Amino acid sequence: MNEDASKLMGIDLNKVISATFLIGGLMSGAASFFYVLTYENTKFNVGFTLGLAAFTAAVIGGIGNIRGAFFGGLSLGLVEVYASAVLGTQWKSVTVFVILVLVLVLKPSGIFGEAVQQTRA
């Protein structure tokens, strides 16, 4: 988001930011509602695993890149299913986080992320 260009166009940034958080909160509430309807139980930390998977998908794809997050989530799902089928369900999370560490070591900006330019002062 370019704040200066938005201000020049007459867009109220505070309203846009508030609306964005409102929509995000409503969507997470709806997702929680449907999750409880589907699985019929809940715990205090039920969203932690899902949030960790979403964060992992975003990091694998590239932070700040919608296309990268999509393909990161898709590849994360495929890896989880393949690892469950081949290695067993107990190794599913291990394989995902091994891939996450490999991506962070080999390409820290993610698969579709752009490298951050560092300048010397």
Image: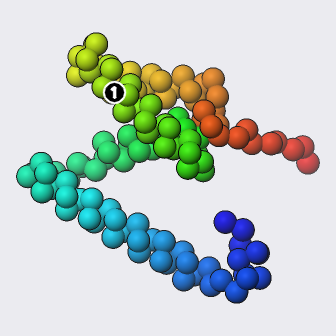
Question: Is residue 56 among what the camera can see?
Answer: no
Q: Is mark 1 on a helix, strand or loop?
A: helix
In this rendering, the answer to whether 50 lies above or below 104 is below
Quadrant in the rendering for residue 94: top left
Amino acid type of disc 1? Answer: Glu
In this rendering, the answer to whether 13 lies above or below 27 is below
Give me the residue at 23% from left, 22% from top: 89
Quadrant in the rendering for residue 83: top left
The spot of residue 102 in percent (x, y) is 54, 22
In this rendering, the answer to whether 22 lies above or below 62 is below
Question: Is residue 116 among what the camera can see?
Answer: yes
Relative to residue 60, is residue 73 drawn left or right? left
Give me the residue at 67% from left, 66% from top: 1
Which residue is label 1 attached to? 80
Give me the residue at 47% from left, 24% from top: 99
Outermost residue on the top side: it is 86
In this rendering, the answer to whether 58 lies above or below 101 is below
Relative to residue 44, is residue 14 drawn left or right? right
The spot of residue 101 in percent (x, y) is 51, 26
Relative to residue 45, is residue 68 drawn left or right? right
Outermost residue on the right side: it is 121
